[in-house]
Amino acid sequence: MTMSLNYLETTLTGIINALTPIFGMVLSILILKTRAKYLDWLSLFIGFFGVFLIFLIKGVALKPSEIVGTLIFVISTICYSLTGILSTKYQKHTSPYIMAYTTLLTATAVCGILTFFIHPSSFHYVIDLKYFSIFVIFGMLSSGYGYVIFYYLVAQGGPVYALLTTFIMPIVTLLLGYFLLDEKVTADMLVGLLFIFTGIGLMNYQKRKEKLKRVTT
């Protein structure tokens, strides 16, 4: 995913990343033999339309030079979706803290080895105190707590429900852009947010309905 950012603008990655729960639904059907309900598909596409609408308003166009980055990013979203599917199948009852720890530990080892051969000069940033604090903050907030929450949602509502959180990223992007970068938030963008909240709400309603049905039977 980080590699693809060398080719893509951040706004375009927002749209591609919103495909994650849709990939998750397809993989859930293929691997977990899940029966997708009409409301599941409807909530996904409503949420994705909201994301697409926001970035369409902001103006996003795919350049020929960005095709490689797009393919890399699509592959990364499929792999991320596959993580939720496999953790549901094999590690659903494992603590989300253990899952997050093992995931990040493995990623650190694999990426560290690859970086040593591809960009060996980049290791000096790790021991530079100016950058080390940033790595710690990003590691704890973005990756550490993020993965704990992700695996908790997988255990509670399934992989597609957890992957639906990717629809929240455009909301956070707009809020941070408004408060930190003085970017404008238009009425059209708010309509897009309404679609996103509607999609998440429908999925949440579906999960609550299924959970209540299991309790009463």
Image (cartoon, rainbow, N blue to C red):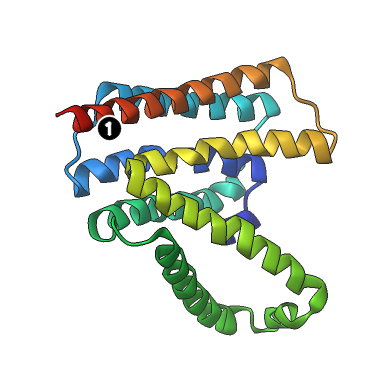
Q: Is residue 1 visible?
A: no
Q: Is residue 112 above or below residue 26?
A: below
* Residue positioned most to the right: 182
Q: Give how far across and how far down residue 163 sits, in percent.
A: 42, 43
Q: Quadrant of residue 134?
A: bottom right
Q: Residue at x 38, y 38 (%)?
A: 161
Q: Residue at x 63, y 30 (%)?
A: 55
Q: Give how far across and how far down residue 175 sits, in percent.
A: 72, 34
| Quarter of the figure with the C terminus | top left
Residue 212 vs residue 165, the one in the foreground: 212
Q: Residues within 10 Å of mark 1 (few under 14, many from 20)?
A: few
Q: Give how far across and how far down residue 106 sits, in percent.
A: 44, 74
* Residue positioned most to the left: 217
With 96 as the anchor, is 116 left or right in this view? right
Q: Residue at x 70, y 79 (%)?
A: 126
* Callout 1 amino acid: Lys
Q: Is residue 94 above or below residue 39?
A: below
**Residue, disc 1:** 211
Q: Number of callouts in the render?
A: 1
